[in-house]
Amino acid sequence: MSTQTSETNIISNINEIQYKDEERRYHGNENAGYILPEDEIENDRMHMQHYCIKTFFGGNFDAPIEELLQQGITVLDSGCGPGAWTLDMAKMYPASKFHGVDISEVFPTEIKPNNVEFQVHNIAKSIPFPDNYFDYIHQRLLCMGLRKEEWSFVINNFMRALKPGGWFELTECTSPEMINQGPKMSILMEALSEVAKIKNLVPDISQHLERLMKEAGATNIIKKELSTPVNHTNKAGELLWKDFSMLYTAMRPIVSKKNPELTSEEAYRQFLNEAGEECKEYKTAFIWVRCYGQKSETIAGK
Ligand SMILES: C[S@@+](CC[C@H](N)C(=O)[O-])C[C@H]1O[C@@H](n2cnc3c(N)ncnc32)[C@H](O)[C@@H]1O
């Protein structure tokens, strides 16, 4: 994202964007449920998180599309964020065309490969592409973005925008419960869960993906679930903790509202460090789900 575009964006939306603690910037779209910041620090976090997830799953996708991507297909990355997945894929598959859509202009607007287009759009309102347009749709980590009633709408729209025989793939993490979760992590996860409840978000959407895909008429659905270490065992585990601690730093206003003793930056930082140590001690693990499915060859423009 160019600085000029970014500044113009901030100024033109100055009344909409809410500045919260630590001078973080949050998206100002009143019609959306997303609760995380939309600034450079968050972009860095998402890029790092991308490489963690790629390592955990052993790749960027599981749907059987490798050959198609090499030949050249049309792909949507829904809720693409800064475009870490989109750009990585565009580089790996130069014959394919990638479209990234996000509610915030956090993706690069000028310096990007020729086979990538980004646009700002609220996917809870529509998917801004014609029927039967994409060969493959990817969406990752919208658990803190889409409200309960929006999930079916979005998935039905994926089915509409997919070509017959096209694939779509959803990857989500699972909260509020981790495996071997200690008391400090429980405080953090519960605070997140409480806000999610107020906003009508679905932190455990990973457990409903298969059903939602079935209800939308997808076939050949495959679910992959895995648990990954948090701050122990390997480098990816350590990076995942770094990702979490950045995420929870952004969420200090939310956590400290319920836990006033954590209001000061110093007390909160110390608490986060202790939570990280606790994850090592408890061998805490985080649960991820990836689900992919296909639009039937015989359904056109559902
Ligand atoms: C946790 S980030 C994940 C980004 C990216 N999918 C990834 O995995 O690296 C969630 C993204 O979804 C976007 N988002 C949230 N609600 C949205 C909506 N209603 N329409 C479009 N994008 C949305 C946010 O702006 C944010 O960039």
Image: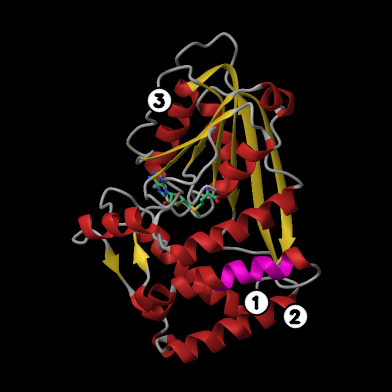
Q: Amino acid at mark 3?
A: Phe
Label 1 belongs to which residue? 182
CB atoms at circles 2 and 1 under 8 Å apart? yes
Residue 193 at least partly seen: no
Locate residue 95: give its quadrant: top right
Name which residue lies at 41% across and 63% down: 39
- The quarter of the image holding the C terminus is top left
Residue type, mark 1 in image: Gly
Sequence-wise first label, 2 or 1: 1
Q: Position of residue 245 (x, y in %)?
A: 57, 73
Residue at image position (60%, 79%) is 183
Q: From the Cβ of disc 3, is ligand 1 less than 8 Å away?
A: no
Q: Nearer the viewer, residue 114 or 88?
A: 114
Q: Disc 3 vs disc 2: which is toward the camera?
A: 3
Where is 21 relative to 230, above or below? Answer: below
Q: CA distance from mark 3 to mark 2?
A: 48 Å
Give the CA distance from mark 3 to mark 1. 45 Å
Q: Residue furthest right?
A: 233
| Whole-percent x, y for residue 154 in the image | 43, 34
Is residue 16 something that shows in the picture? yes
In x, y percent, where is residue 109?
Answer: 42, 46
Does the numbered disc 1 mark a residue whose Cβ is under 8 Å from ligand 1?
Answer: no
Q: Which mark is residue 281?
A: 2
Residue 226 has which mark?
A: none
- For the residue labelled by badge 2, is the local secondary structure a helix, a strand or a loop? helix
Circle 3 is placed at which residue position? 129
